[in-house]
Amino acid sequence: MPYTQLGRTGLTVGRLVLGTMNFGPATDERDSGRIMDVALDAGINLFDTADVYGRSQLTGAGARGATEELVGRWLARGDHRDRVVLATKVYGSWGDLPNSGGLSARHIRQACENSLRRLGTDHIDVYQMHHIDRRVPWEELWQAMDLLVAQGKVLYVGSSNFAGWHIAQAQEAAARRSSLGLVSEQCLYNLAERAAEAEVLPAAQAYGLGVIPWSPLQGGLLGGVLEKEREGGRHRTGGDRAQTQLAARRGQIEAYEELCTKLGTPPSEVALAWLLTRPEVTGPIVGPRTLGQLESALRALSVELDADALAELDRIFPGPGPAPESFAW
């Protein structure tokens, strides 16, 4: 497993990040534990979860918080907690009460205490804001986060789904408080969805944030979906939204899978290998449902894409180009 630093921090993390959103709703506790065992043994040390994970987006089964509880039971075994860089998130709503979600100081404090309890730990290594909360002033937000850091309950603070200008706002507000500020941004970024290149990635790079892409396979669209379709398999990538994407981008996906065949590498591994070539990327999140999916992700670490392959991927999936040149003269 190759390692790198998380942004400008001294924290060392693997080039792949284990996502746990499927643990509980799609993968039972026994298989989830096996996946975490293999991931840790392979050198993956950054495990990502969220307080609201545990309820299936497709069926509605399960309960929010169940994934943190599952991960917490696994962490209690042996020396797992010492070996894992543990990341979770705050923002999602837990009910109909006025302060049951968002990023108010009140909710941040309450959510952190609840995550610590479910995870069975005394600290969270990377506490991430799951979404921007436009109602909350940065002064209030950083006061709440700085208090958690001072108490030793949180070591680093990260963001997720922030715009580039949100990152700039957050960092400038943190600087006024002489705080470390954000150390990472978790954003949607993959071959088929490259909008983050316009401003999010440059902002993260300028302010020293590590970039942790989520959905590296665009919900399965980059995972060999046409091959599975020909084999009679079902496309399990989010229902109507994924089917709409496939219908709109079938030509691109056909060209992509043809290139992967020429390279002799499965599409899912090419998609991950491409992200690993991006200089801003710390490591993509892989969220396996099965051990086989994890093993495929690990193989992507050894995939080398030459200049011709990278150029062809850019031709099939052109990015937005640098800002502001891409939308100015």
Image (cartoon, rainbow, N blue to C red):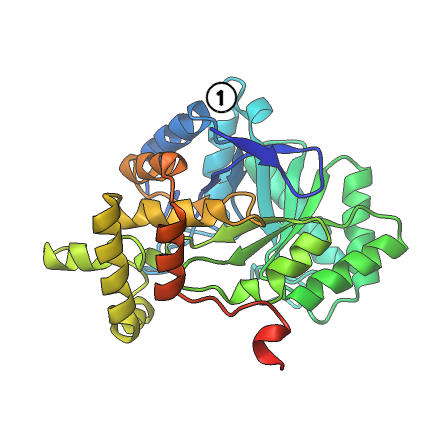
Q: Which residue is mark 1?
A: 77
Q: Is residue 66 visible?
A: no
Residue 145's spot in the image, x, y percent?
76, 49
SS at mark 1? loop
Q: Residue 236 falls in which quadrant of the image?
A: bottom left
Residue 140's spot in the image, x, y percent?
81, 60
Closer to us: 181 or 283: 283
Q: In the image, 181: left or right of 80? A: right
Q: Residue 113 falls in which quadrant of the image?
A: top right
* Residue at screen point 73% across, 53% down: 207
Tag 1: amino acid: Arg
The residue carrying pointer 1 sits among few (fewer than 14), some (14 to 19) or many (20 or more) residues within 10 Å by Cα, namely: few
Q: Residue 273 falls in which quadrant of the image?
A: top left
Closer to us: 123 or 206: 206
Quadrant in which the C terminus is drawn = bottom right
Q: In the image, 149: left or right of 4? A: right
Q: Is residue 132 visible?
A: yes
- Extreme residue toward the top, this view: 78
